[in-house]
Amino acid sequence: MKLIIQKFGGTSVATEQSRTFVISKILKSIERGFSPIVVVSAMGRIGAPYATDTLLEFIKNNAGDMTAHDTDLLLSCGEIISAVTIATMLNNQGIKAKAFTGGQAGIITNENYTEASLLFTEPKKLLETVQSGIIPVVAGFQGVTKTNEITTLGRGGSDTSASILGVSVKASKIEIYTDVDGIMTTDPRICDRVHKINNLSYNEVFQMADSGAKVIHPRAVEYAMRANIPLVVKNTFSDDEGSFIMQNTEQKERLGSIVTALAHRSGRVQYMLTEPQEGLLKKIADKNISIDLINIFQNFIVFTINELNQQKLEILLNEEYCKFTKTEHCAKITAIGEAISGVPGIMAKIATTLTKKNIKILQTTDSLTTISCLIKEEELKTAINALHEEFDL
């Protein structure tokens, strides 16, 4: 029995027409000799009646603030509606199917409501269903605690559900269906010369997602990578083969570029702290403020944060009597590629390219497979397009 996980996002299940494409993809997997386990997101995006953000807005506007426990109970509804809808469509076409909640599918989490983490899986019921010739259609984004309280896995949780279940049942591969043909070299909303990347490594996709690219949730990549299960990002509405994500980068066909992709994060604020107090970084972490780029010197520290945490950070800095300056309205660009490691001159090439466009680099950092630069947000589009062209992406 060749098991395959097929995960369909919100746009794939949003309309009657789009759902017919979903059914078609499921049937094609059966024709290819697979036994599918389907995972679905809530229908559509904010404004759609059953979308996650729509449900949140309804309660907020009509009742007020919810507890974390009740928030998860509400948020689980959208995916359950999708699961029942797709299972019913399959049954009405003569294909046996059954809807499952995340908990019924065996995803057991801790009690950290709205951001729950996996404890373990119990796939017995799911496997028995497949073995009996029935397609499980699982509500993504959710699990249950040991005491059967519903939890959700945080944003991008349906991707994570797909990988968790793929690992749990030892699937042959995990297909993530969306409304684009695969993973692009950069954000097509910023650069109109992007193209699909046919093959990537787990690490490259993880770094892309972690650096701001809206491709697949980093946790989903992490789970698949641990079990070495291939991931494929595909388009529900086309027959494109998609982007194939695997462990062994030596098998990949590449165009010869050292850089595989460019990702970005907007809304950054850069802080320079002179004579920082000992233990300050821990206090920042205790306030649940995530530091992005950071450079530590003998007498000062430079780092960036999300602008949403700006007020919270400055209250702390003033309480600690820290002297600081800040630069607002920044963006981080990250060049990503397995081939970057050990190749000299990449940072120099980036710096030269941006300098030619009169773009000032405010801060840099790098790892084995990434190089990141902080620039002013107003220059983001120019910078992305210039680097995309320079690295022949």
Image: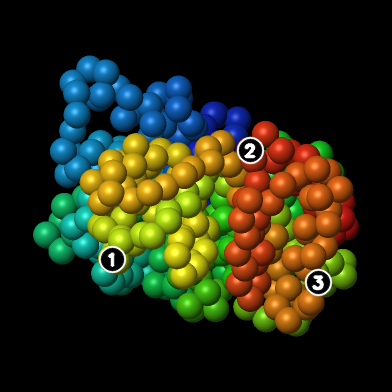
Q: Secondary structure at mark 2?
A: helix
Instruction: Give the colouring mode of the picture.
Output: rainbow
Who comes first in sequence, dot 1 or dot 2?
1
Residue at 59% across, 34% down: 18
Residue 376, can we see it? yes
In the image, which disc is placed on residue 345? 3
Circle nearer the viewer, 1 or 2:
1
Q: Is residue 374 left or right of residue 36?
A: right
Which residue is farthest top? 62
Crowding around mark 3 (Cα neighbors within 10 Å: few <14, some 14 to 19, many 20+) is: few
Task: Tell me which amino acid carries mark 3.
Answer: Gly
Could you say where residue 226 lies in the image, as x and y percent from the top left? Answer: 48, 78
In the image, which disc is placed on residue 377? 2
Residue at 34% across, 37% down: 311
Who comes first in sequence, dot 3 or dot 2?
3
Q: CA distance from mark 3 to mark 2?
A: 25 Å
Residue at 18% across, 33% down: 66
Task: Tell me which amino acid carries mark 2.
Answer: Glu
In the image, which disc is placed on residue 279? 1
Residues at marks 3 and 1 touching, judged by CB atoms closer than 8 Å: no
Who comes first in sequence, dot 3 or dot 1?
1
